[in-house]
Image (cartoon, coloured by chain):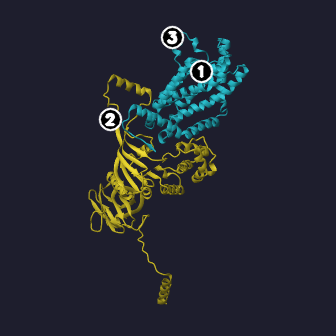
Amino acid sequence: MGQPAVVVHGVWKKFRRGERHDTLRDLLPSLAKKVLGRTRPHDLQGAEEFWALEDLSFEVPPGEAIGIIGPNGAGKSTTLKLLTRILKPTRGACHLHGRVGALIEVAAGFHPDLTGRENIFLQGAVMGMKRAEIARKLDEIIAFAGVADFVDTQVKRYSSGMNARLGFSIAAHLDPDVLVIDEVLSVGDMAFQQRCIERMHEFKRRGTAIVFVSHNLQAVGSLCDRALFLRGSVQQLGVPHEVIRHYVSSMSDLGAREKSLEVRIHSARLLDERNAHATNVAAGSELTLRVEYTPVRDFSHLTFGFLVYRSTDNLLVYDANLTGEELGISMVRAGQSVQIDFTFMAHLTRGHYHIVCHACHNPTQSFIGYLSPAAVFSVTEQRTWAGVANLDVRGRARSVCDAVNEQIAAAGASS
Amino acid sequence: MSTVEWGYRSAGQRLADDVREMLREQRDYRELLYQMTRRDLMLRYKQTVMGFGWAVFMPVINTILFSVVFMRVAPIDVGVPYPVFAYTGLLAWNFFASSLRFSVTSLTANTNLVTKVYFPKEIFPISAVIVSAVDFAVGAIVLVGMMAYYRIPVTSTVLLLPFVLVVEFMFATGIALILAMANLFYRDVKYLFEVVITIGMFATSVLYPVTRFGGATGALLQLNPMTPIIDAYRAVLLRGDLPSTSFLLSAAVSTVVLFVAWLLFHRAEFQFAENV
């Protein structure tokens, strides 16, 4: 593999909370205080500072992509800004070898009063491209962005989608050695997003090292060779599906929310065929979701149900609803807990899923009980690469001759 | 290869590293400087009916106004026809003043680029100075016409003109860098600047020789490095003289100001994104 293209070594970054002195009016009193010694030196700074990043280290060899995932405020954007040298680390060092392309603010250099063509040259220069290079790639950039008819129109007349597409297109023609990407895949329509993904795979094949930040865990899983789970410090660094799994399950621990309404949902447990707590389940196996409800007052006409989501992209996989009548509890009494076992088959492909439980009052169509996430589980299977429903496909091969003979035999048998 | 290293370096080593980095960045991003300057010039041309006509219009109007004042109301003798004296002064002063006026908000007006993309931010104030230099060149066409009209002979001292230009360019750039940076941290700077630049014109030999001020005021005004620069334009263009010795001092001051300002700017640059 040779020398890594990106080396981040023991990087720490400190930020200050609150507002800074923006006018002299604010500065002068604080200076006066300092000079007069009325405050201890740390009063102005110490308490307000916090570490946005602690001891971050990773490397990316050429042709490899690393995905950085984590909750909001985990330091993902800070990491990108450190990589693109907009911020300097408080401690530690970042080394980037070769030309660095950043798909962060792809249209940052655009001036609304200039035409698309003029902006291509301007933005290209902002990204470090030479005029001759831009001129050579001009047609390609315009075609990729799909703005050929508007290239001599002022950018202020562009739609936001056109703006973003043009910006991305310029960046995509940079030929960088290191590419830093921040959630830009959300721009443009499906077809354009598809072209972007293809372009990134192409970059990888050409030996570009990619650092990719995204909340779209499916995209991270498909593009990246490794993933880094960041929450201020490195939580885990490794194979994408393992890191994503760790991230998803840790988020569930943090975020269990019960909207305490009129039906309390205390506990929900996911059990396998042997009544053991299920976390890793085989595709197609039978699962039981055991949920306990306590109504605050008497109710009839309730519906109990749950939703199954794929955690990596919040895809709703199934919405189950069973009425009280179906379950044999047409009436529930205040303070008397009810336990319901929902049994279902995990006809799912490999991935990470979570379950949200709810109770609904039919006459008013209102949700009166809610628990999210009620359970988290992963499905293991080795057959599929993508998709969500396990169709349990089997196959059989034979010669066409045999197939015809079989049909003739079947026809003979029926006559 | 680009690296961010943090370790102990001696002050001298650090200075040498910084200077090398400053120069390398300007070389690597010279295309961007060109594009930024082009952008600002194009915008000027696009958004106004008169375009570069404004570069001529303002000094011409001012010349007419002050010619009335200093030829009719309170006549002064400046050794050359007053209108050409005033126009030369106004042209050179406008180059300086508009360089600074564009620079002071150049970083804060481009927040998006300052906080989101890495490149040497010196490009903003420097391109503002270059744009003003283009205005200066356009305005100079009128000066040539005036010199022909007043039959002012062109002598060999005109060969020193580039030297005078370079000194003013360096001084303007130095101050521009400081103002752009200061306004990023404290927005008062922009308002303060307007006051100072207005007073500055009357404290410099733009419309009259400041040597006419006597006493303490006169002595204080001797320290203004812009006066020898503007006088040098008049010396080499109108009088066929060499620039005064105080111009050499201004040249030295300009060099130091530019160097120190650029170094300060470069060292503060990494804080821009966090403070804008």
Chain ID for cyan: B
| Kind of element beneath mark 2 | helix
- Can you identify the residue that label 3 sits on? B216
Q: Picture coordinates of residue B160 (x, y %)? A: 62, 24
Residue B203 visible in the current orientation: no
| Kind of element beneath mark 1 | helix
Mark carried by residue A47 = 2
Tell me the amino acid under the disc marked 2. Answer: Ala
B190 on left or right of A146: left
Q: Picture coordinates of residue B269 (x, y %)? A: 46, 35
- Can you identify the residue that label 1 sits on? B230
* Disc 3 from disc 2: Cα separation: 50 Å
* Disc 1 from disc 2: Cα separation: 52 Å
Chain ID for yellow: A
Instruction: Tell me what residue is drawn at x 51 percent, y 14 percent.
Output: B220
Q: Picture coordinates of residue B95 (x, y %)? A: 59, 26
- Classify the position of the N terminus of chain A by image quarter: bottom left
| Kind of element beneath mark 3 | helix
Q: Residues within 10 Å of mark 1 (few under 14, many from 20)?
A: many
Marks 3 & 1 on one chain: yes
